[in-house]
Amino acid sequence: MSVLIFLIVLYILLGITLMKLFEKAGISPAKALIPGVAAAEWCKMIGRKPSYALWLLFPVVNLFVYAGMVIDTIRSFGRFGFGDAVMAVVFAPFPFYQTGKDEKAVYGGPILEKELEFHRLHHEAVEKKDTLALKKLENQYPFMKKSGTREWAEAIIFAVFAASFIRMFLIEAYVIPTSSMEGSLKVGDFLFVSKAHYGIRTPMTVLQFPLMHNRLPFNMGESYLDEPSLPYFRTPALEEIKRNDPIVFNWPAGDSVILAPDRSWDMNQARLKWGASAVSKGKIITRPVDKKDHYIKRCVAIAGDSLQIRGGQVYVNGQAAQNPTHMQFSYILSAPQGVSVKPAQLEALHINLPEARGNVVQLDEKQLEGVKALGLNAEREKSPAAPGYMFPNDRKMYSSWTTDDFGPVWVPKKGAATPLTLENLPFYKRVITLYEGNKLEVKQGKIYINDQETTSYTFKQNYYWMQGDNRHNSEDSRFWGYVPEDHIVGKPLFIWFSTKYGSISNGINWNRIFRSATSM
């Protein structure tokens, strides 16, 4: 709401301050207050066609169009300073008011038309090698000459602005930091991720340091301000999220985290791990949706699906789900008497030894066959129960669930209603409160939402169930539940670079470069 009020005030002030500029340019001041007409006249004043104003209606693009128009406006009145341009972009009504008030600020005609004339004459003079004409042009159009410092500054600002735009709305580069998706996506894989495939999510956090996600370098703190903020909005998707798609998303449990030196811990994890002393382990950070940590997992169930895991096999809607080609589990290796295996032999099977826990390694089916061919015994590690750690994080009612034996759970779907009971409330409590912004209370055995007693709930958005391909070494939906639609970031496209075990010192995985990131 605060951002909406700011935009309304900005629009009103722009209209008022443009009145004096219109008057100086020989345009009726009243036109500055008429929506649509004001934009068309504004375009003509700086040398654009009136139809150019239509670009102001297109989200994202209008930011660039607006920035160009306000800069060209003050330049049309003889204000060519670098500071003038910056102030125009930051808050245009202020320099507009100053220019209108300044009797020395005279409208010199559409600046863009002057620039076109300069470039035409300059091109002719260069072709004729007419140094005298070039000198006259410099005197006639002094605003076209810029210092080397300013040219460098403008080039850097433009490059950062363009890179930030591409990163924010189109494609962003990511690196795989953990082995949760081994062996499909490996530690050290660098990915390009499309933010358009599932619809472009416009930024919710308005003020942020360019090209930074949520932390500044050298542990200098968060890279953004919580306020002002914009509501969630997503453009139409190019394709729908499908089962088995690898997805980049914001960590749902990452709204309140403790920052430890090695990683982020959500508050539930921290309390289970450290108990009452959790708050002493690091600084507590609360983050908006688009500034939560990025995760990449495989979508194994979509909105409306029922899911269950038995013996490590995922079942969706009662049918065994298609398993990733390189799905991994933990195996305990042992060598029979007389059998000796060197680490190089295991590395030749592309086994991630740095991630091994003693004699426990992560293997897919092909690697398992290779290990047995070397003469080693491999026993699949059993997944122990973890009361409180497993979703829905209820120690009493669902204490026996493990990563291999889990569920059943139903994945919420937009517009679908579900009965609410005290037994199933743990599955939907976070959805109802944090993801969909309702007040929820339980009083005398009855459920109240927004102070109204209820026995059902209708969901406002779609949700997804994400799991890592490394099934015994992945923190995913089995631990923190559903991924809301507004947390979806994008679709991985391809691997553009890959280092062995996440370090260039270990070498480069040349065979992984330019490989598809969506292949199973």
Image (tube, helix red, strand yellow):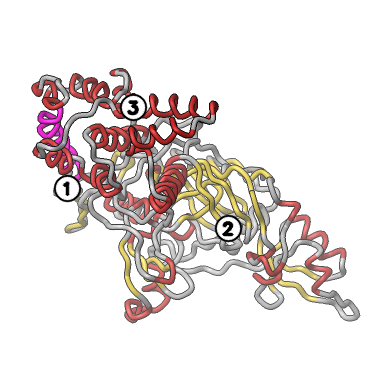
Q: Residue at x 53, y 63 (%)?
A: 402
Counting residues from the start of the chain, the first of labels 3 and 1 encountered is 3
Residue 274, placed above or below residue 209: below
Tag 1: amino acid: Asn
Indicate yes or no whether the magenta region holds residue 369.
no
Q: Nearer the viewer, residue 443 or 324?
A: 324
- Magenta stretch secondary structure, dominant: helix
Tag 2: amino acid: Ile
Counting residues from the start of the chain, the first of labels 3 and 2 encountered is 3
- Residues packed near mark 3 inside 10 Å, few (<14), some (14 to 19) or many (20 plus): some
Q: Nearer the viewer, residue 23 or 70?
A: 23
Magenta residues (range) = 3-21
Q: Residue 209's spot in the image, x, y percent?
A: 36, 56
- Per the image, the residue denoted by label 2 is 176
Q: Is residue 490 left or right of residue 2?
A: right
Indicate yes or no whether the magenta region holds residue 15.
yes
Tag 3: amino acid: Lys
Q: Residue 225's spot in the image, x, y percent?
A: 28, 57
Q: Residue 189's spot in the image, x, y percent?
A: 63, 56
Instruction: Give me the C-alpha separation between circle 3 and circle 2.
Output: 51 Å
Residue 256, placed above or below residue 315: below
The tag on residue 450 is 1
Instruction: Give me the C-alpha separation between circle 3 and circle 1.
Output: 61 Å
Q: Residue 136's spot in the image, x, y percent?
A: 38, 33
Q: Nearer the viewer, residue 172 or 428?
A: 172
SS label for mark 3: helix
- Per the image, the residue denoted by label 3 is 114
Q: Nearer the viewer, mark 3 or mark 1?
A: 3
